[in-house]
Every structure is written in C-alpha cells, then in structure tokens.
Image (cartoon, rainbow, N blue to C red):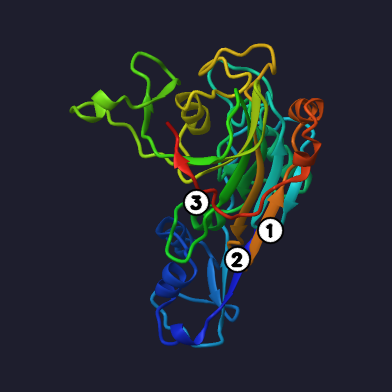
Amino acid sequence: MPVLCYHVPAEYDGNLVKNFLRRGCGVSSRLLARLKEAEGGITVDGVPVRAVDVLREGQTIRLKMPPDAIRVEPDDLPLSVVYEDGAVLAVDKPPYLAVHPSAGKEGPTLAGAVVAHYLREGTPLAFRPLNRLDRNTSGLLLAAKNRHAAHWLGSGVPGGGKVEKEYRALVLGRLEGAGVIERPIRRKPGFGITREVVPEEALAQEEDRGKYCLTRWESLAADDRLSLLRVRIETGRTHQIRVHMAWLGHPLAGDTMYGTDRDILPRHALHCAAMRFPHPESGREVALTAPLPEDMASILRERGWDAQLERWGGWDTPKGRQGG
C-alpha cells in the first residue's frame, strides 16, 4: 500500500494532527476518517497517533493509504504512458476508445486498460480520472493513484492544485485571430447527451439557464475550408468545446452531433495536447504534451501546416473578442 510522508513545518508546531492534515496537506475528511480507523494509518516518527494529538516542528507524519476496491474489469490493451509516479498516471488516449464502461456499449475501455496496467505492475488500484475525454477525443488524460491525489487535484481544496489543459481542434471554415466564448451550456431539451448554448430567451425566463462555461481560443492556421485552433477551457462541461465552436458558426471537423461534416474526418477533430499541474505531494509543476494523432496530423501536413505539429504555445492566456 502506498505511504505518504510529510514533515511538520514551523507554522504547524503545536497544531493537532487533524488540523495539519486537513489544512496543511489537503487530506479530505473522508480519507482522514478511514486513516483513523486503519491500524497504523497515521504515524508520527514511526509511532501511531490519534487525530487529536499535538505535532511538533520537524516531526515526520506518515499516512498508509487504505486498499482500493477494484470495480472495473482489466482490458489487455496497449497503454501509451506519458508520465507516471507514485501519485499520478498520465496517458495519451487514442481516439475511438471510451474512457469508462457504459450500459449497452461493449468493448474495451481506457479504464480497463489502466486497471490492467496497475495489475501488471503489482499494484492493483482503482481508476480515478481527473479529466474527461469523449470516446472520439484523443490526448492526455490524468488519473490519480490514491484518494489523496484525487482529492487534492480534483476538488480545488485550499492549497490544492488545478489541472490546466490545452487542446487542438480543427474547425470548419476560416477562423482567424483569438477570442473568448462565455456562454452557459445546458442539456438540449428532449435529447439525452446532446448539449446546447442556452438561448437568449431562456436566459430571460425562469427556465433551465444551464451552467457557466468559458472557452478561450486562438487560431494557429486557417484556409477557406478549415482552421486549426488552440483551445483552453476554464470550465469542464460536457461537450463544451464542441458546443461553443458550433455556436460560433465553426463546428469541429467530423462532428456530426453539432455539425454536418462527414468527409474530412470520421470523428470530431479534438485532441488534448498539453497539460500542467502541481504535483500533489511535492508541489512542483509537471508539464506534459502529447503529439497529434496521425489522422489529425496528416490533415495539417496536407495543408502545409507542418510547423504547427510541434507548437504548444506556452501557457499564456489567449485574449481577444468574445465569439459572436
């Protein structure tokens, strides 16, 4: 079982164990409760302690993570590991692979491939993804390897970390410059998974006003048929990029749910190309990239946009007009 180790700094001298773990380490109340119940779950300098015991500067506190309950069947699939350590795993998901098993849809999943990867390493763990990708979206997906990492990176706790993501999208038509789309999205009435930008008339009435969404885009290359965009989202709603770009009048190539293209690509052209996050244990920044898959890369090469295959653009925020 993994063990987390923390050293007590001067500012927490004289504090209770539970206060240091909750405020200084970002440990969730649920995990703290489980650690208190486990034999040797919390030790200080090798000695078991209670949550109400007092800490002193320079002491070392260790947390023995409780075992996981594995609920996903393993799938023997190749897994493209971009980064891995004791706390997190980042993989490059191929298109056409679902992240989770779902009712009525058979076949292998990324979750099953990750569980199989853990088993091969002799560390059976649950699959805890920290970002979501549609079946046909490719690119970086980050998973936590224990409850603490999942809580620290996924819930915005004080002192916790945020996973920032940058996408590449091919959209229909010529789109140049940069912009921001700040429009709420809701489930389209009468549909299951399909979303829509909330119409103005609905915003003025007591209807479903959707959820706040913000998408930043920057054009990297364009011709009369296609544009390559760099996209960052400040919110992570279902189909957010696809819905916002369709609302702007530039649906993704290959997206038949929010557009009409069936010729350029047999899937929507969206790839999570870059990611950064503070490490849940050390706090150091981890920055990762994943190259475009061949189906999107070949389209860039056909248009002479080869220079864009390796351009990640840094982490400055694209600025510009609001779409529309």
Residue at x-position 44% and y-position 56%: 156
**In the image, residue 24 lies at what x, y percent?**
46, 72
Local packing at callout 2 (Cα closer than 10 Å; few below 14, some 14-19, many 20+) is some
Checking the image for residue 281, the label placed there is: 2
**In the image, residue 86 lies at what x, y percent?**
68, 58
**Tag count in the figure?**
3
Tell whether 57 sits left or right of 120.
left
Quarter holding residue 40: bottom right
Image quadrant in which the C terminus is located: top left
Residue at x-position 45% and y-position 62%: 32
Checking the image for residue 86, the label placed there is: 1
Q: Amino acid at mark 2?
A: Glu
Quarter holding residue 93: top right
Viewer-side label of 1, 3: 3
Q: Is residue 192 visible?
A: yes
Judged from the image, the secondary structure of the residue bearing numbered disc 1 is loop
- In the image, is residue 38 above or below residue 77? below
Residue at x-position 52% and y-position 27%: 242
Tell whether 289 sits left or right of 234.
right
Cβ atoms at labels 2 and 1 below 8 Å apart: yes
Local packing at callout 1 (Cα closer than 10 Å; few below 14, some 14-19, many 20+) is few
Residue bearing mark 3:
154
Q: Nearer the viewer, residue 315 or 80?
A: 315
Q: Amino acid at mark 3?
A: Gly
- Mark 2–mark 1 Cα distance, whole angstroms, equals 9 Å
Q: Amino acid at mark 1?
A: Gly
Mark closer to the chain start, 2 or 3? 3
